[in-house]
Amino acid sequence: MAHRAHNFSAGPAVLPVPVLEEIQRDLLSLPEVAASILEISHRGKPFLRILKQAEADLRALLSIPEDYAVLFLQGGSRLQFSMVPMNLLGEQFPSATYIVTGSWGKYAASEARKEATVEVGWDGQATNFDRLPQSHQLQINPAAGYVHFTSNETIQGVQFAAEPITGNTPLVCDASSDFLSRPIPINKYGLIYACAQKNAGPAGVTVVIIRRDLLERSRNSLPGYLNYKNHVDANSLMNTPPTFAIYALGLVARWLKNEIGGLENMLEQNRMQAQLLYDVLDESVGFYTGHAQPNCRSLMNVTFNLPDDSLTAAFLKEAEKHNLNSLKGHRSVGGIRASIYNAMPTTGVEQLASFMVDFRNKNS
Ligand SMILES: *Cc1c(COP(=O)(O)O)cnc(C)c1O
């Protein structure tokens, strides 16, 4: 097999090897199609079958009920920062509440502010987003059109273990970096969006799951392409969709179903793998300092700092020699970020954990 380093990239990120192998095997010609996935019409039967199967597999994995629509859109999660307020707010609901627990939530709120009134229900900026709110700290306006939160803050490495309690206001979630990493109770949500390139596939497609009654809020005066209702009516085929990305996402969903055995199993593996790294942090007080408070640590992005910048640089350099790549933290947090999404094999995490111990022993 081709040489592959362990890839801790925050996104686009590691994909399951069996998925890459299937893509490679079938890239010249899909079975029974006699053409590549890159070459066929999005309106032809073979692609329609792929689209339908991808949706069916997502519905099965997440137990998505029929009163929710599933969309495959473009523009990344960034476009959802605007589409969500454009569609869900208006005369009837002039404001939304945003729970800001990291960089992505902050971006989402600032885009929403261009469309409507944003009330911040909690803001973790004062401690550089190292923690999450307790339920009693949330300030939710009961008249808000929705409450927005980011289930996993990819840059800071803080993750909600369960949905924040927000009453009857529809809950909107940016689940970009923990989508499909665990089961979620869909019926607690009004809308969930997630770009694929962290956990669910390659860049180019963003999944939106929306409760159908909320579609009534989308005004006809919205630009057609930015109106959820149009995408639901067109079954995500309003224009040419990102066919390859949807195909690959479908393969990832099938891998989760058939090889992992569903999202409960995925969660168990993700927990175990994250624990290997957090255990090293906890036994390395004074050398490695985790960014997230222990009670809100992410299972997807493990963030920590070393005593100084030169040790961080040495860590990154040494790690690459050990085939452990893309570990540099985001500049706003510094230090190291190990992204250990679904497709990261346990052996990759084990190797990183033992590298961290060795590096600490040599340098402290
Ligand atoms: C990566 C990420 C985004 C941005 O996604 P794009 O597809 O690049 O727009 C938004 N939110 C979260 C939580 C992310 O991890």
Image (cartoon, helix red, strand yellow):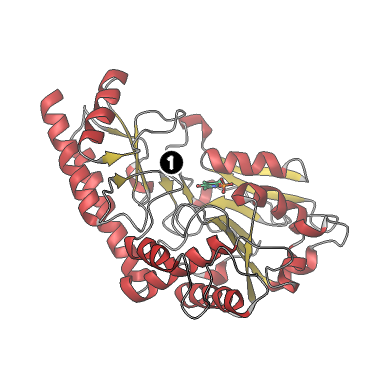
Mark 1 highlights which residue? 131
Relative to residue 28, is residue 127 depicted above or below? above
Q: Residue drawn 56% across and 67% down? A: 188
**Does 121 sit left or right of 157 as displayed?**
right
Given residues 302 and 323, the one toward you in this image is 323
Q: Is residue 255 visible?
A: yes
Question: Where is 333 relative to 11, above or below?
Answer: above
- Amino acid identity at mark 1: Arg
- Residue at figure coordinates x 40%, y 64% from the top left: 182
Tell me which corner region of the image, top left, top right, bottom left or bottom right, holds residue 260. Answer: bottom left
Mark 1, secondary structure of its residue: loop
Where is residue 355 shown, x and y percent of the image?
17, 38
Looking at the figure, which quarter contains the N terminus?
A: bottom left
Q: Residue at x 64, y 55 (%)?
A: 74
Quadrant of the image for the C terminus? top left
Q: How many marks?
A: 1
Q: Give the left or right position of residue 304, taking residue 214 as reference.
A: left
Residue 167 in sight:
no
Residue 336 occupies which quadrant of the picture?
A: top left
Of residues 94 and 6, which is closer to you in this image?
A: 6
Q: Position of residue 256 (x, y in %)?
A: 38, 69
